[in-house]
Image (cartoon, grey):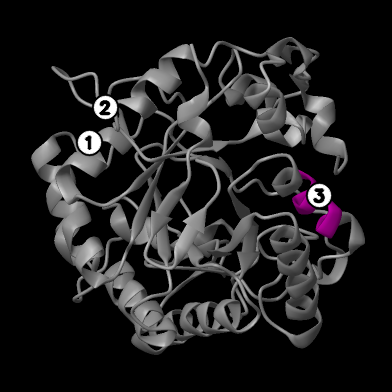
Amino acid sequence: MSSNPLFQPFTLGTLELPTRVVMAPMTRTFCPGGVPHKGVIEYYRRRAAAGVGLVITEGTTVDHKAANGYPNVPRFHGEDALAGWKKVVEAVHAEGGRIVPQLWHVGSVRRLGTEPDASVPGYGPSGKSKDGQVVVHEMTHDDIREVIAAFAQAARDAKAIGMDGVEIHGAHGYLIDQFFWATSNQRDDEYGGDLAQRSRFAIELVQAVRAAVGPDFPIIFRFSQWKQQDYSARLVETPEALAAFLQPLADAGVDIFHCSTRRFWEPEFDGSPLNLAGWTRKLTGKPTITVGSVGLDGEFLQFMVDTDKVAKPASLEGLLQRLGDEEFDLVAVGRALLVDAQWAQKVREGREEEILPFSREALSSLT
């Protein structure tokens, strides 16, 4: 089947993409001190040069003391880090690509001992203590305002250095997502209660980002049903509930929804072949990004443990059919693009047999 649907341009307001191929955000932990260096610049540039229309960076932490959860994760604050990211932007633009940072706060996932200040615990909608020590600080209203302001400032900085938009990380059990779930959000104030109330934090955050960047700067919001802690979790069980969850976020200022799934080909609800991105597009009218084991013959979890398994390239026929049918608008590629910077070019030229297989070893370097 022709791969043409992947290589058609996409336009949404000021965002003009040369192809529908998106580089999925993938944490790489190759930024000592949180600053992107030459290797990071080249890592992103190579993907744009080979036909990736939109690069979504790895998760970058906003300017809050508890935002980070891992060593060597890049920052999106501070003159040194922003200068590094500006060089990334210039390199990607020089190759004809577009780029947005993924703005991130890990929330209660953070552990004591984590950089940059080892004494700072995780922050979350609800607190947790162990052996008399606070390991998760329950966020006060002032804390909530500080985090929202940090996201707004990061978005403002992204626009200032020439980024083409921002992605807000609201998925996978990190801070924004923690507010969505009754198990992690047991607050009894206006940020807790039913899902509509538990969504207040995210809605106010999106509103603040929109106010910071103006009406025309693209905002992408990434969400998921599954979590790192529970791969079978489901935030909503019906299309009606999904619509009720997403529409307030769209009204707050989200332009594109990035719908994170483990396997893009799986239907989201019984009785329809639509996946999560398909349902989201249908219900909100907003463009969507699909993602989940694109281009590989095995979903990613089996490669996240110590293993010698290899994920081989897989047929894109079903994906291209669905993209051509406008079930979704953009396709995010993760591991396949991580291991092979030329993935998009090889697909475009019909050289799928040359695509490199993915193994855990690919995580050990920036290629």
Position of residue 270 in the picture relative to residue 76 (left or right): left
Q: Position of residue 332 (x, y in %)?
A: 52, 39
Residue 230 location, quadrant: top left
Residue type at tag 1: Trp
**Of callouts 1 and 2, the N-terminal one:** 2
The magenta-colored residue range is 40-46
Q: Residue at x 59, y 25 (%)?
A: 301
- Which class describes the residues within 10 Å of circle 1: few (<14), some (14-19), or many (20+)? many
Q: Is residue 199 above or below residue 328?
A: below
Label 1 element class:
helix
Secondary structure, mark 2, is loop
Amino acid type assigned to the residue bearing label 2 in the image = Glu
Question: What residue lies at 48% left-to-right and 11% top-to-bottom?
Answer: 1
Q: Nearer the viewer, residue 81 or 282?
A: 282
| Tag 3: amino acid | Tyr
Residue position marked by numbered label 1 in the rendering: 279
Q: For the point 66% across and 74% down, which residue is it?
A: 76
